[in-house]
Amino acid sequence: MTVLIKNAHIVGASENYMGDIFIEGEQITAIGKSLNVQADQIINATGLIAFPGAIDPHVHLEMPFMGTFSSDNYETGTRAALHGGTTTVIDFILQKQGHSLNEAFNEWSSRATGNTLGDYSFHMAVTDFNENTRKEIAELIEKKGITSFKMFMAYKGALMIDDKQMVGLMQEVKQHGGMVTVHATNGDMIDFLVDQFKQQGKTAPLYHYLSQPEVTEAEASERFAAISGYTGCPGYIVHMTCEGALNAVRNNNRDNQKVFAETCIQYLLLDASLYEKDFEGAKWVMSPPLREKKDQEALWAGINQGLIQVVATDHCPFTWEQKQLGKNDFSKIPNGHPAIEHRVELLYSEGVRKGKITLNKFVEVLSTNPAKIFGMFPKKGCLAPGADADIVLFDPQHEHTISATSHHMQTDYSGYEGWKLTGKCKTVLLRGKVVIENGKCLVEKGYGQYIKRNTVSQII
Ligand code: URP
Ligand code: ZN
Ligand code: ZN
């Protein structure tokens, strides 16, 4: 099967020109002006922007968490992702404390295999680092293509590991060429504040926010960066929300070391005033919480300064019924919110159109940098001969409104209900096949492939 995309406005992390894209099978084989080739399918992309399929390196599908499971499974989650131009996701395997990494790998693989519509890979969250788990790291990297290991500095008793375990894990991962990613907040300090608020009878979602002040994230980010520097293990801070944490990365760069940083679309666009809506604030209960306007400004600046390389989602959806688990106790509200579908369109409408970032930066933070950092480049993350034909054809003029009544995520609310956006993913190709066309999904579960990732994170 061959496909020819004609007259597209082609945009990459550093390219911006008009041209045609020729696809043979699953890959791009030629790009140029007025390509003179025959094709089985011709797509007229006049007026459309073509960019590489977006990669979301931070999603939690069907994840057991806080007494329930996140409400999108591998089928619904990757379908919603495709609708929004995200062709590859990286999900998190969670080791159960007292159990092996391989058991966790098998459990997660059995849920995902054959069920995804989009391509996917895994990070491994190490929640119990000991001599046995240490011995499993090399095989995961070399045989299973899991080259990134997640550490939680919070959620004590469930996911958190201490500094001693972090140093050991980082030494081992470094030795085998991998990298670590981190949920960087001070778990003990948060637990202290949670207990204190609860003792005072303060149970509303607002106290979720107040029990995770900026300092809890800034302190943990500094500590993580210091240990990463000491061990020499490449590090990546997930879901950065605030100025204090960004400054930890800035300081670390001053020491001639690089810690990668990811923020998520919600931290750029939403703020903590949403927690003043009584229990409705539970829709935005996530960790870390939404912050202040000054933090949003810092994050946009951090993106443009190259200190933040990725805009992800931390998609971890729960239904409104699931959120009721914390009706009388904010610490029991399942942490997370739905976002996988709208990251690309939100970042275009609110970021590119409002002049906060360029079109090239948009592609860089959504696709090229995640592919480079997580060992998928140049198969993913760029439009070039030899790359997978994962392509979004984006209509920059199309106006639409976000609503839970029309989104494809398995949640009965949206954190952006009623938001009017300009710009929509019109046609999405994954490995040469049109998977989304004008709001219709054209593939079934099972089309998505597991991506074994490389260890080399390109320096960006
Ligand atoms: O609130 C969040 N972020 N839920 C998912 C788990 C995590 O910490 O990433
Ligand atoms: Zn987290
Ligand atoms: Zn997460």
Image (cartoon, rainbow, N blue to C red):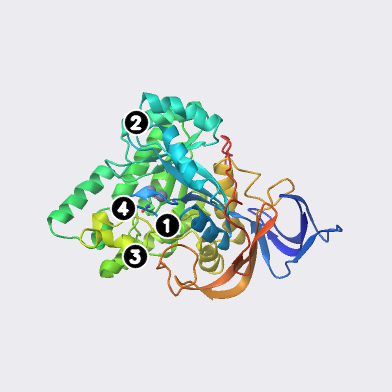
Measure the C-alpha gap from mark 4 to mark 2.
24 Å
Q: Which residue is mark 4?
A: 214
Inspect this view and state whether residue 149 appears.
Answer: no
Amino acid type, callout 3: Trp
Q: Pointers 4 and 2 in contact (CB under 8 A)?
A: no
Q: Pointers 1 and 4 in contact (CB under 8 A)?
A: no
Q: Which residue is mark 2?
A: 165
Q: Which mark is residue 298?
A: 1
Mark in front: 2 vs 3: 3
Q: Quadrant of the N terminus?
A: bottom right
Q: Position of residue 269 (x, y in %)?
A: 43, 64
Dot 1 beta carbon under 8 Å from ligand 2: no
Q: Position of residue 267 (x, y in %)?
A: 41, 59
Sequence-earlier tag: 3 or 4: 4
Residue at the image point whose x is 31% and y is 50% from the top: 66
Q: Which residue is mark 3?
A: 320
Inspect this view and state whether residue 438 appears.
Answer: yes
Q: Pointers 3 and 4 in contact (CB under 8 A)?
A: no
Sequence-earlier tag: 2 or 3: 2
